[in-house]
Amino acid sequence: MEWFTAPEHWLSRLVFQRALAAVYLVAFLAAARQFRALIGERGMTPVPEFVRRVPFRSAPGLFQWRYSDRLFACCAWAGAALSAAVLVGAADAVPLWAAMLMWAVLWALYLSVVNVGQIWYGFGWESLLLETGFLAVFLGNADTAPPVLTMWLLRWLLFRVEFGAGLIKWRGDRCWRELTCLDYHHETQPMPGPLSWYFHRLPKPLHRVETGANHVAQLIVPFGLFLPQPGATVAAGIIVVTQLWLVLSGNFAWLNWLTIALALSVVDVPALTGGAGKSPWQGTGGGPPLWYAVLVCAATALVVVLSYWPVRNLLSRHQRMNSSFNAFHLVNSYGAFGSVTRVRHEIVVEGTDEELLTEDTVWRAYGFRGKPGDVARLPRQFAPYHLRLDWLMWFAALSPAYARSWFEPFVARLLEGDRDTLRLLGHNPFPDGPPTHVRALLYRYRFTTRQERRATGDWWDRTLVREFLPPVRGRRA
């Protein structure tokens, strides 16, 4: 069965699997550390209420049968532990069937988390991790050479990630076609990073170059993934460089890192090294077990069939981005920033411990870990870690509709001094007890100019727009 395996890709498979395990580790750690306040039994959108409304067929997973915060914590920490074990090579130290079981458990655990995560897990990189994790089940381990079919499925996934993102931009906001979107994007993206101010302040001609290069990388280069080597490796290398540029310019959880991992799976190491690094199976004559070949072929057939929906979506003028077409998040559509906001709005949440509100009431702001707040605070780098509350606050600032299900429960927990909720924040201005009132104001934020930065030391300038939520009184007030 020489046609079935690609022994020359043993090193690229190894790097890909380790990188995927690292992403799984980050994802499970984020789930374990944030779930109680978000979706726990006393969370803003509790899982028990969700599973009473949503049947198993719509959101399959472990927590449809039973949920408790303790069980969720056990699953999340177990996923983190298993991810760490795979990261250091445990899946290559066991028989092939056991390695496949390890990857399958990781996928099933994270599927269970995502399918009860509701709005907090409604991001494209969740589905991307699940689809990638599913393919990893059939990628094999040190007992067998990488299967050709699974390696091509990884390319197909990478193609859809990149080409889908390129199409949604080209079809969406006209600023992408006019090469002006990056005049705004670095400033208005959901969570700027420590270098975003500098990217935003690049000369506008360089922004045009950035935008044009993005179109090339996402609309043309992905087709190179299907070229003979070393053409496919060159295409993958361009994608890696593009993704590293995005890593430097913002915080997009593990989206960029997982895309880089997928691109590394395409790289033909022997072609780059002149034949060095030959696989341990070359010349051994050993083939994969028949049962394994059957499973890989079955998984490939399943992906081919399910690809109908994302392909139809890619060809549609009404293309949807980051959509799952089945409850298992297999073979999804991807894309980002089909529209770019020109103005940045931020919600600033404030509290006071005064019993009676007057015009002279002193309000103190809560600080978030990642999203802009204090104008003098340099944006931080958090990716690949995902700050779910901070991201949802960005969406809420775009429209109150995004916050309808969770913002008032969030405020209520601040008024209670809920410890799990406060752990999600970067600064609690009321360490000695909860406030009597909480309110939220909507501000327009913009990056300071170079002159303003030198004069004030601030990274942001802000202007009050309106009240987002009028003062809410706590029970003890």
Image: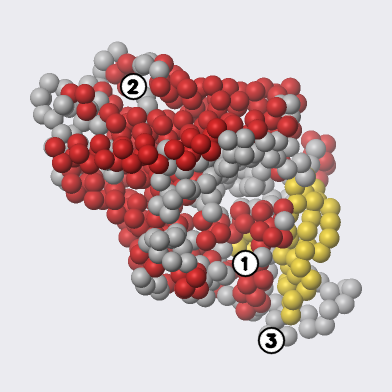
The image position of residue 133, as x and y in percent, is 36, 45
Q: Amino acid at mark 3?
A: Arg
The image position of residue 55, as x and y in percent, is 43, 66
- Looking at the image, the residue that sits furthest to the bottom is 476
Q: Are marks 2 and 1 in contact (CB under 8 Å)?
A: no
Q: Are marks 1 and 3 in contact (CB under 8 Å)?
A: no
Decide which of 238, 203 is in the foreground and name it. 238
**Is 263 located above or below residue 197 in the figure?**
above
In which image quadrant can residue 307 be found?
top left
- Looking at the image, the residue that sits furthest to the top is 274
Decide which of 369, 147 is in the foreground and name it. 147
Mark before the other along the chain sequence, 2 or 1: 2
Q: Residue 53's mark? A: none
Residue drawn at (79%, 71%), measured in percent from left and top? 470
Secondary structure at badge 2 equals loop
Which tag is nearer the camera, tag 2 or tag 1? 1
Asked if residue 174 can be seen in this view, the reply is: yes
- Looking at the image, the residue that sits furthest to the right is 359
Secondary structure at badge 3 equals loop
Query: Residue under circle 3?
Result: 476
Query: Would residue 280 be found to the left or right of residue 33 on screen?
Result: left
- Looking at the image, the residue that sits furthest to the left is 285
Query: Would residue 291 be found to the left or right of residue 158 on screen?
Result: left
In which image quadrant can residue 3 be found?
top left
Query: Residue under circle 1?
Result: 406
Quadrant into which the C terminus falls: bottom right
Q: Residue 268's mark? A: 2
Residue drawn at (77%, 64%), measured in percent from left and top? 468
Mark before the other along the chain sequence, 1 or 3: 1
Distance from disc 2 to disc 1, alpha carbons, whole Å, reads: 47 Å
Q: Amino acid at mark 2?
A: Asp
Decide which of 459, 92 is in the foreground and name it. 92
